[in-house]
Image (spheres, rainbow, N blue to C red):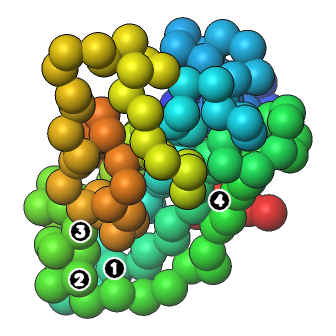
Amino acid sequence: MIQQVANTRTTKALTLKDIINVSYASCLNFFHTNTMFSPWKFNVFPVAYYFWVKRIDSSNYQYQSCYASGYYGTTPAGMNQHFDTVKTKKISDIQAMHPDLICDKDGDERVCIEYVYRFPPSPYDPKKLGFIIMRPSRSAKSIAGTDRSIFRYTIVITPKPGLFPIAN
């Protein structure tokens, strides 16, 4: 969806609204209603993190992160969302995030998408997800630094030119 959402527009750069819509649509297979929002019927809510990098030279990268989650709000427009301005980071910082974000040549770009189900602040009850006998274990800390999560999935892609950085 990230690669296709701007196909019919003259301006190909993704917006925060695009990220919100893609994040919302990505979770509709499980949260097919507004159950992804508070009061969290399944006792988890989805968070989609996006980390964009562009190699400037052999030791420096441009970097931008953003996320959209079901923690706040009751509709996609009200989703909890955030995006950072473009920053410059050292290759060691990028390597520490995810080794597949390292680009081969100057000007190359990568996007790491991390999708997790996070626990709300209330006590986590795995029975609400149908786990009566088996208990899903917590994921290791995510790239974003969160540790209250299960079912973490990470993918790194090379985006189409012009999609990133994200505009507000």
Residue at mark 4: 166
Q: CA distance from mark 3 to mark 4?
A: 19 Å
Which amino acid, by three-letter code, is at mark 1?
Tyr
Q: What residue lies at 19% left-to-right and 39% top-to-bottom?
A: 137
Q: Quadrant of the N terminus?
A: top right
Q: Earlier in the sequence, mark 1 or mark 4?
A: 1
- Residue 24 point in image, percent of width and height: 67, 30
Q: Which residue is mark 1?
A: 61
**Observer-nearest residue: 1 or 8?**
1
At mark 3, the secondary structure is: helix
Which residue type does callout 3 highlight? Met
Q: Which mark is residue 97?
A: 3
**Residue 34 relative to residue 40: left or right:** right
Front: mark 2 or 4: 2
CB within 8 Å, label 1 to label 3: no
Q: Is residue 114 left or right of residue 16?
A: left
Q: Residues within 10 Å of mark 2 (few under 14, many from 20)?
A: few
